[in-house]
Amino acid sequence: MFRLRRRPPVCPNGRIPDGQRVYAIGDVHGRVDLLNVLLAKIQADVEKLPAARIQLILLGDLIDRGPDSAAVVERARQLAEASDGVSVLLGNHEEVFLLALGGEIPAMRLFARIGGLATLVSYGLSEDQIAAADYNDLIRLAIDAVPREHLEFMGTFKDLITIGDYAFVHAGVRPDIPLDRQRTEDLRWIRKDFLDSPGPFDRIIVHGHTISENVEERPFRIGVDTGAYVTGKLTALALEGDRRWYLST
């Protein structure tokens, strides 16, 4: 009987290919002010270090909860338009947003419950409009308010990115399942089964989704969601060769 061949577990001090440098930013959740500060810090880091091919990865959950989701999406869109070295992962909040604007009432109900009303306000809806609307009305209002280019941009968001010994996902991975067989549901939503697993995984997993006071660095995973929308701390992991370091607001 044939067995799937798995990639051997990576060394905890993983590497990315020579000549590259990666900056992976955790969940922004509508804090464009913090995103702009962190991007400036990343630019300063780039300028002081030797030349390298830069890859910027946003780990998803650009929207909801914070006050400026529309501005965050636009900032990310402009970055991606200006450079093919910018990638964005689809977080669970973007997933629900797209389903809601696709006309799914249960998704709009969930969207409203997980901080989406702040997103609608950032796109120009008033609190009075939202309070007077039922879920069908909210869908219609949101479709009218959100620019098509933002929806098209979100349609380009990725589920998983691998670079060298690292894999970048929004939430995590299902233990004991090869990366190329992971379900998108797990990549965007998993929590306990992934967080409680000691590994190893096929690669070192860099993720957001679950808030921790500081970067959570474990042998086979690194969590960089430091709760920007409530803590004011937005964090990026930087990787080059076998080195890693962190930048934060």
Image (cartoon, helix red, strand yellow):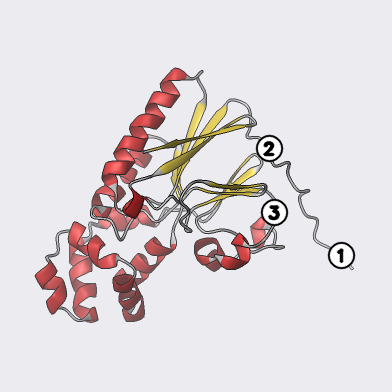
Which of pointers 2 and 3 lies earlier in the amino acid sequence? 2
Q: Amino acid at mark 1?
A: Phe
Q: Which mark is residue 2?
A: 1
The structure residue drawn at horizontal position 37% and vertical position 30%, both measured from the top left corner, is 41
The structure residue drawn at horizontal position 18% and vertical position 78%, both measured from the top left corner, is 137
Is 37 drawn above or below residue 110 in the view shown? above
Q: Amino acid at mark 3?
A: Phe
Residue named by callout 2: 13
Tell me how far mark 2 sits from mark 3, CA to CA.
Answer: 14 Å
Disc 2 residue crowd, few under 14, some 14–19, many 20+, Cα 10 Å: few
Whether the residues at callouts 2 and 3 have beta carbons within 8 Å, the answer is no
Rendered-image quadrant of the N terminus: bottom right
Viewer-nearest residue: 206 or 141: 206
| Displayed quadrant of residue 25 | top left
Residue named by callout 3: 201
Disc 3 residue crowd, few under 14, some 14–19, many 20+, Cα 10 Å: many
The structure residue drawn at horizontal position 31% and vertical position 60%, both measured from the top left corner, is 64
